[in-house]
Amino acid sequence: MTQSAATKKLLYNQLSAVFIQRGYDGATLNHLAVAAGLSKASLYHHFPGGKPEMAMVLLRNAIAELQKTAFRHLSGSGNPGKRLGAFITGFAEYTRDGESDCLLAVLSHHLTAGEETAIHRQAITDQFADWHAALSATYEAGGAKPKRAARQAHELLAALYGALLTAKMHNQPELFQTAVRRLRKATARV
C-alpha cells in the first residue's frame, strides 16, 4: 500500500468512526475535522461536496470492505454451507468480532428524511438488495426453493445485525461472537 493509499485509509477510518459514534446528523464538520486532525478547510479540500460527499465516499468504502471481507465468499461453486460459513466469518472480521458497528447499519438507522440523505439511503438499500440476492442464491444452491432461500437470507442478515446490536447494547462483544459460532454451525448443514 502506498503512503497516499495508507493516508486515505486512515482518514476514512477516522471519519467513519465519527459517523459510527454520532450518526449522520450528529457528525458535525467540527467533530469530523478534529477526528481527522485537519481543519474544516482541509476537509473541504478532500471532500468539496461537504458532509454529504464525505458520507457517500465512506459508504462506498464500507461497501467495498464488506464485499472484500464477507460477501465475496458467496460467489463460486463450492459447498454452499462452507461459503455461508466463510461469509459469516468475514462479517465478524469486518465488525472486529462485534467490537465495531457496521457503518451502513448506523447510517441507515440515523439518516433523516430529506434530499441531502436520500442518495445515501438509496445506496444502502440497493446494496443490501444485491447482497440479499447473493445470499438467496447461495441458499438455493444448497437446495432451498426460491421463497425459502429469500427468507433464509433475510433471517441470516437479521441474526447477524441483531446480534451485533444486542452485543453493543449490552457492551458484551462475546454475545455477538457466540451468535456467530451458532450461525456458522447452522449454515454448515446447508
Image (cartoon, grey):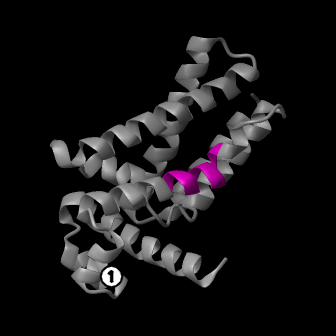
Q: Choose between 143 and 51: the one closer to the eye.
A: 51
Q: Residue at x 24, y 41 (%)?
A: 118
Quarter of the image where one finds residue 48: bottom left
Placement of 102 over or under 41, stated as above or below:
above
Q: Considering the numbered disc 1 on the image, is that residue within a helix, a strand or a loop? A: helix
Q: Residue furthest left?
A: 114
Placement of 139 over or under 69, stated as above or below:
above
Is residue 185 on the magenta stretch?
no
Placement of 54 over or under 32, stated as above or below:
above
Q: Choose between 135 and 65: the one closer to the eye.
A: 65
Please state, as top left, top right, bottom left or bottom right, where the C terminus lies in the image: top right
Q: Residue at x 61, y 20 (%)?
A: 149
122 relative to 188 in the view: left or right: left
Per the image, the residue denoted by label 1 is 35
78 relative to 110 in the view: left or right: right
Specify the segment rendered in magenta.
Answer: 62-71
- Give the tally of numbered discs: 1
Q: Choose between 144 and 38: the one closer to the eye.
A: 38
Placement of 174 over or under 81, stated as above or below:
below
Residue neighbourhood size for the residue with mark 1, other residues' Cα within 10 Å, grouped as few (<14), some (14–19), many (≥20): some
Is residue 63 on the magenta stretch?
yes
Quarter of the image where one finds residue 187: top right
Prevailing secondary structure of the magenta residues? helix
- Where residue 119 appears, x then y in whole percent? 29, 43
- Where residue 50 appears, x then y in whole percent? 24, 65
Q: Residue at x 62, y 60 (%)?
A: 93
Q: Residue at x 25, y 51 (%)?
A: 110
Whether residue 143 can be seen here: yes
43 relative to 182 in the view: left or right: left
Amino acid under label 1?
Ala
Please state, as top left, top right, bottom left or bottom right, where the N terminus lies in the image: bottom right
